[in-house]
Amino acid sequence: VANRARIVAAARRAFDAAGPLVSLDAIAREAGVGPGTVHRHFPTKAALVDAVLGAAVADIVADADARRGSDEPVEALLSFLEELVVSGAAAHDLADRLGAGGDVGPAVAQPLAELKEELRALLERAQRAGGVRTDLDEGALAAVVAAGHAAYVHPTGGRLAARVVLDGLRVRPS
Amino acid sequence: VANRARIVAAARRAFDAAGPLVSLDAIAREAGVGPGTVHRHFPTKAALVDAVLGAAVADIVADADARRGSDEPVEALLSFLEELVVSGAAAHDLADRLGAGGDVGPAVAQPLAELKEELRALLERAQRAGGVRTDLDEGALAAVVAAGHAAYVHPTGGRLAARVVLDGLRVRPS
């Protein structure tokens, strides 16, 4: 388990630094283990990518969980969503997968289910506080989060544009 | 001029029905003129596409202009932007061009400048009414409008998701 965690951590650093095409040998060197050890834990590159994505989602889950106790539940939801869309490729991939409910690997499925649960909890708290719209179904919500990501990566967009998009989830002033 | 306008109107219908690859001969038939007449007014397909896009933008300008007198300036701005993003491919193209400040043909340049002027006027009225954020520059605003379009065309999005995104332009409740 220690080796497995070390390989996943090394793979995250290597993917960040060199992209998804980085070799398993390079990841083994980064982890300080032999190629055979990598292969024993992750027989395919896809399995390793899946584990890395799962670890990234688990970090997001931990972030969401830390926000659940906030006494400003609307801000807790919106600032969490802001981090979610800003965290870039992972969030984009995530939004696609959340939106499509598509095929995720086994290492991603569980943290993804946890993330959905965290999101539901953050959303419900913000809605109960009266600060967030209650008339959006899961699909419309996913579309708004994806739009937040689009605003962030837009050539003239950025963090402020993304936050403006997500602020649309607030109840309208009457 | 009458023939020119008739050809542009016919081309808009033909592009809508058959896509941008529709032949100039088909457009001439639709307009009830000969192919030579089309060629005299529009020596290239690009010139005709440009005129069609210009006419579409001019319609949007007329829509914006009609909303300038509204006594609900915030709603006037947001519902106009909603129509803008919902009008689909044209708006998307428009958002790209507005965002990039890229190369538009001569028939588009003038209505596009008018549209920017109309948007500025709608925005300023809504801001003076105290209902819309004043801290976004033109680029961030373009990114939010593009995000509204992204929400509309998202597989699980639609008009409500787009409107939620654009509602983010409202001032936050304090």
Image (spheres, coloured by chain):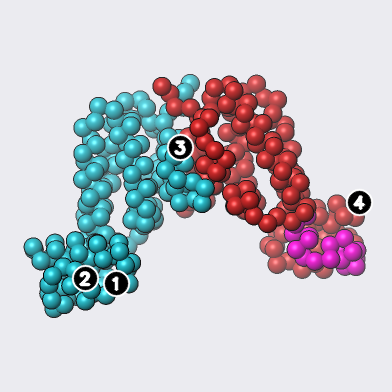
Chain colours: A red, B cyan
Chain for numbered disc 4: A
Residue B12 is one of the magenta-drawn residues:
no
Identify the subunit bearing mark 1. Answer: B
Question: What residue is pinned by disc 4?
Answer: A2
Q: On the picture, is A174 further left or further right than A118?
A: left
Q: CA distance from mark 2 to mark 4?
A: 70 Å
Q: Which residue is mark 3?
A: B164
Q: What crowding class fits label 4: few (fewer than 14 Cα within 10 Å), some (14-19), or many (20 or more)?
A: few
Q: Are marks 2 and 4 in contact (CB under 8 Å)?
A: no
Spatial CA distance of label 2 from label 1 is 7 Å
- Residues shaded magenta: A34-52
CB contact under 8 Å: marks 3 and 2: no
Looking at the rendered structure, the secondary structure element under dot 3 is: helix
Residue on which disc 2 sits = B27
B79 is higher (above) or lower (below) than A153: above
- Looking at the image, residue B34 sits to the left or right of residue A154; the answer is left
**Dot placed on the residue nearer the N-terminal end, 1 or 3:** 1
Label 3: how many Cα within 10 Å (few below 14, some 14–19, many 20+) = many
